[in-house]
């Protein structure tokens, strides 16, 4: 594990509110004097942002599941090398909006590509880097789809490709997230995403504060 940095990832279904919570946590940590790198996947680095456009463009309906998986990991490899490992090496706190767990549940289980294949790519792209703590902001598949659709309409977003997947796909993602939390209870902590934003923030702080 690199130097003295702290690596925390946020996971959850679309519309779980994890992005807002990550910003709030970053603000708290900075107020304490910590240096914080905020990153997101797919995206993060400028090269990752270009990969993100391919992945989430609703026009790319023919993108095959294997290409999708490799693109998520291409974005992640760039993020790990260019931003995450150097920041951890400098002793900073790194907050990531999604990481390998997203590929595991969406591509490994949702798309049925298999957990072993996903973890093989993780070994190449992340080279042993694992989050110290993963905050799983938990909402069910129905709530997720309803919130994602509402957001897409409000923003007339073109990033709709993943949100257009079926309810069945999102239920499988939900199930896989819970299986992961049960398998790795030390690292993956469930936070109730249906609570109010302030309540969720407080719950997250209770989990993070012993580590900082
Ligand atoms: P994100 O930008 O986090 O969207 P949201 O704020 O709606 O959660 O993620 C975009 C989509 O990409 C989301 O539907 C989940 C999906 N995704 C994967 O399928 N695999 C991955 O490895 C990652 C990082 C994201």
Image (cartoon, helix red, strand yellow):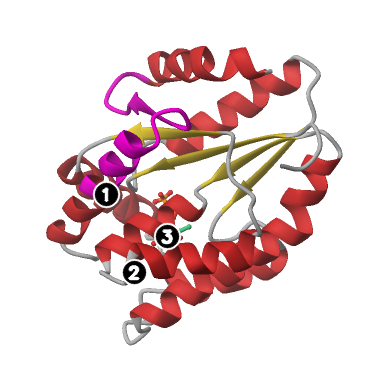
Residue 133 horizontal/vertical position (percent)? 54, 32
Please tell me whether residue 12 belongs to the stretch shown in magenta: no
Identify the residue under disc 1: 176
Front of the two marks 2 and 3: 3
Question: Which quarter of the figure is the C terminus placed in?
Answer: top right
Residue 165 horizontal/vertical position (percent)? 23, 65
Give the magenta part as a residue range.
175-196
Q: How far apart are marks 3 and 1 (CA)?
A: 11 Å
Q: Is residue 179 in view from this perspective?
A: yes
Residue 90 horizontal/vertical position (percent)? 86, 39
Q: Is mark 3 within 8 Å of ligand 1?
A: yes
In the drawing, does residue 26 fall left or right of residue 91?
left
Between disc 2 and disc 3, whose residue precedes?
A: 3
Between disc 3 and disc 1, whose residue precedes?
A: 3
Identify the residue under disc 3: 103
Mark 3 element type: helix
Identify the residue under disc 2: 161
In the drawing, does residue 46 fall left or right of residue 148?
right
Classify residue 59 by image quadrant. bottom left
């Amino acid at each position: 594990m690199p130097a003295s940095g702290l690596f925390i990832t946020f996971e959850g279904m679309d519309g779980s509110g994890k992005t807002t919570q990550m910003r709030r946590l970053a603000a708290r940590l900075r107020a304490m004097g910590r240096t914080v790198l905020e990153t997101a996947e797919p995206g993060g680095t400028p090269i990752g942002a270009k990969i993100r456009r391919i992945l989430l463009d609703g026009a790319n309906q023919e993108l095959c599941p294997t290409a999708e998986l490799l693109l998520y990991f291409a974005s992640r490899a760039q993020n790990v090398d260019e931003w995450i490992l150097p920041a951890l090496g400098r002793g900073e706190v790194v907050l990531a909006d999604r990481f390998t767990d997203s590929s595991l549940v969406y591509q490994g289980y949702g798309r049925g590509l298999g957990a072993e294949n996903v973890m093989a790519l993780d070994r190449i792209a992340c080279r042993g880097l694992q989050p110290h703590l993963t905050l799983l902001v938990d909402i069910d598949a129905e709530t997720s789809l309803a919130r994602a659709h509402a957001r897409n309409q409000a923003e007339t977003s073109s990033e709709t490709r993943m949100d257009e997947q079926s309810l069945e796909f999102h239920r499988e993602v939900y199930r896989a997230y819970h299986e992961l939390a049960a398998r790795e209870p030390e690292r993956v902590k469930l936070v109730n995403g249906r609570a109010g934003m302030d309540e969720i923030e407080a719950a997250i702080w209770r989990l993070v504060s012993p580590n900082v």
